[in-house]
Image: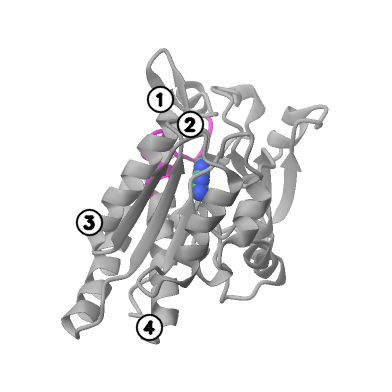
Amino acid sequence: MTLVLEGKTPSLKIREEIKREIAEYTSQGFRKPGLAVILVGNDPASRIYVRNKIKACRDVGIESFFYHLDDRVTTEELLDVIADLNTREEVDGILVQLPLPAHIDQNEIITFINPEKDVDGFHPQNMGKLVARTEDGFIPCTPLGVDLLLKHYGVEVKGKDVVIVGEGFIVGRPLSLLMLWRGATVTVCHIHTRDVSRFTREAEILISATGVPHLIKADMVREGAVVIDIGISKVGGKVVGDVDFESVKNKVSAITPVPGGVGPMTVTSLLLNTLKSYRRRMKVSKRQTVP
Ligand code: GUN
């Protein structure tokens, strides 16, 4: 029987623990944790992601501060908003939804965010901490979500051959570092890889993060593999992943659904990172039951 690695149950479980921990702080008279979310423009997918993040914050008791900026905003104007948030006492986390419009230098924006509030984990200081394997950095939310999902279902990573398809800044690159940290032998396929299936067929854990719908077919997957699908695309009004779920599911031991797999875990990781920042800034200690 193939195990479907759905993310809603572990997400809910972790979110309940987060909620409990925050309720303890507020009952002691501490303020709520705060997350600032900046959305530039009106990309429909980004709007949905941002809405989900804000709702998840509300559900656990994190206060959100939403900044919806016009897509003609200048880099200087955006930097001004971030400069204010960088020093605001009640803001523990700052998230700038990506992608940004082409006229804005994404790297300049990310590097300007206070690394202590960079709950997306994209600042070079936090990416560096992922390389250095220091626990006090923020791990980007999707890689952390994958890590928590694998842990929840008892999938051992240490010593495994992990193949990641996609080397993007948000998922593939940081996830490859995290899987290395967890003891996997990691291969990363990308746009210049000549024969992707040569690698994917060998993967004990196959992770796809390309955004190409149904890129991964059954003949590209090893029998009994664990398959993690991070792609989200819309095909004919339906949300689909990178993996051709119907054909692949019969061949593997475990597979994430899309939607309802990694997605909820990504949002949960954002809540965890925001709580981590809050604890450090408020000098309060962690509940043992929270990851
Ligand atoms: N766009 C797609 N995924 C993400 C993410 O994890 N964080 C941000 N800020 N933007 C994204």
Q: Nearer the viewer, mark 4 or mark 1?
A: 4
For label 2, count other residues whose C-alpha is less than 10 Å away and answer few (under 14), some (14-19) or many (20+): many
Amino acid residing under circle 4: Met
To which residue does mark 3 refer?
59
Q: Nearer the viewer, mark 3 or mark 1?
A: 3
Q: CA distance from mark 3 to mark 4?
A: 21 Å
Establish if 97 lies above or below 211.
below
Residue at 66% of width from left, 67% of height from top?
125
To which residue does mark 2 refer?
232
Q: CA distance from mark 4 to mark 2?
A: 36 Å
Quadrant hosting residue 224: top right
Mark 2 touches mark 3? (CB < 8 Å): no
Amino acid residing under circle 1: Val
Report the magenta stretch's main SS. Answer: loop
As drawn, is 248 to the left or to the right of 47?
right
Mark 3 touches mark 1? (CB < 8 Å): no
Image spot of residue 3 (x, y percent): 41, 42
Q: CA distance from mark 2 to mark 3?
A: 24 Å
Mark 1 touches mark 2? (CB < 8 Å): yes
For the magenta stretch, what is the residue range? 251-264
Q: Nearer the viewer, residue 154 or 266?
A: 266
To which residue does mark 1 refer?
239
Q: CA distance from mark 4 to mark 1?
A: 40 Å
**Label drawn at residue 282:** 4
Quadrant hosting residue 281: bottom left
Residue at 24% of width from left, 67% of height from top?
19
